Image: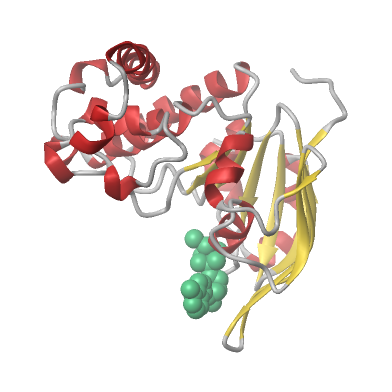
Amino acid sequence: MAQSAEMILRIADVTKSFEGVHALTDVTFEVRAGHIKALIGPNGAGKTTLLNVINGLLPPDIGHIYFRGQELIGMSTDRIALLGLSRTFQLIRLFTVNNATVLDNVMLGAHKLLKPTICGALFFRRKTAREERVVREQAMDALAFVGLEWAAAMLPGALSFGNQRLLELARSLMSQPELLLLDEPASGLNDAEVEGFMQLLSAIRARGITILLVEHNMKLVMNVSDEIVVLDFGRWLAEGAPAAICADPKVIEAYLGACMENGGS
Ligand SMILES: Nc1ncnc2c1ncn2[C@@H]1O[C@H](COP(=O)(O)OP(=O)(O)O)[C@@H](O)[C@H]1O
Ligand SMILES: [Mg+2]
């Protein structure tokens, strides 16, 4: 358990609108180093938008994001990745050009400055054989960590949906992040896969990696989170320990009718 009081991520007064849609309004919260913090809320609450602002895909209208005290607003996604921030996407993004294999997909995670569009042959020519071997070994380790070693030579499209999610997770770990942003990583997984995923998240946390987890599966959220923050209509609604969030009337009204039967079992 991380006893450090250090806040690895600080989101301060972030506001973002899309042509009149107030996706985020004045959102402020912090993420403690070494913790798993869940970010929950109804569909359209602004969760994905906030992850996009944090990793530099979207500029906010107003507000600041501080990672280890350093302002991220204005930095490119590549630069932010180099600082130690990695993420997965709500809709899985895998590379299939040039018959890229599962292993190739994981290896691409190691090369933060390389655009996905120039992967494949071009990319490998630019690496020395030795560099490539090291990256390949790291990628095999990442695949073994998520339990996908057996699939290394397969095409990603041949994997089940649940295994594609694990592949994305393996790739996101290749950059050796300090902070991982996960956008609904368990959506579409069956119960057994969710169980396995919980164990993986705990194992990632045990490596000292901080996680900001957007997730609807409340059993997973309740089991793995140190703390939960709730957004509703783009606004901060509540924040606290899982049990307190589950019992908060505001949260129950906005979102968590299902909390008890899901999380309590
Ligand atoms: N690129 C975009 N253009 C216009 N509206 C958007 C865009 N992205 C998100 N929105 C709107 O912002 C709000 C928040 O969306 P989102 O962040 O995806 O919510 P969540 O991930 O919590 O379901 C929604 O009303 C959504 O329709
Ligand atoms: Mg979303």
The residue closer to the viewer here, 243 or 18, is 18
Q: Is residue 138 above or below residue 257?
A: above
What is the x, y in percent for residue 53?
Answer: 62, 59
| Residue sitting at x 37%, y 47% | 115
Q: How is the image coloured?
A: secondary structure
Count of numbered marks: 0
Q: Can residue 213 be seen at all in this image of the molecule?
A: no
Outermost residue, bottom direction? 20
Q: Is residue 60 visible?
A: yes
Lateral position of residue 127 relative to residue 13, left or right: left
Left or right position of 159 against 83: left
- The residue drawn where x is 39% and y is 19% is 142
Q: In this rendered view, identify the residue nearer to me: 215 or 113.
A: 113
Residue 32 in which image quadrant:
top right
Q: Position of residue 43 (x, y in %)?
A: 51, 67
Residue at the extreme right = 5
Residue 224, by quadrant, is: top right
Q: Is residue 162 left or right of residue 216?
A: left
Please name the residue shown 53% across and 45% down the image: 78
Check the picture and name the quadrant holding the N terminus. Answer: top right
Which of the 4 image quadrants contains residue 141? top left
Where residue 49 appears, as percent x and y from the top left, is 57, 64
Q: Nearer the viewer, residue 199 or 99?
A: 99
- In the rendered view of the protein, which quadrant contains the C terminus? top right
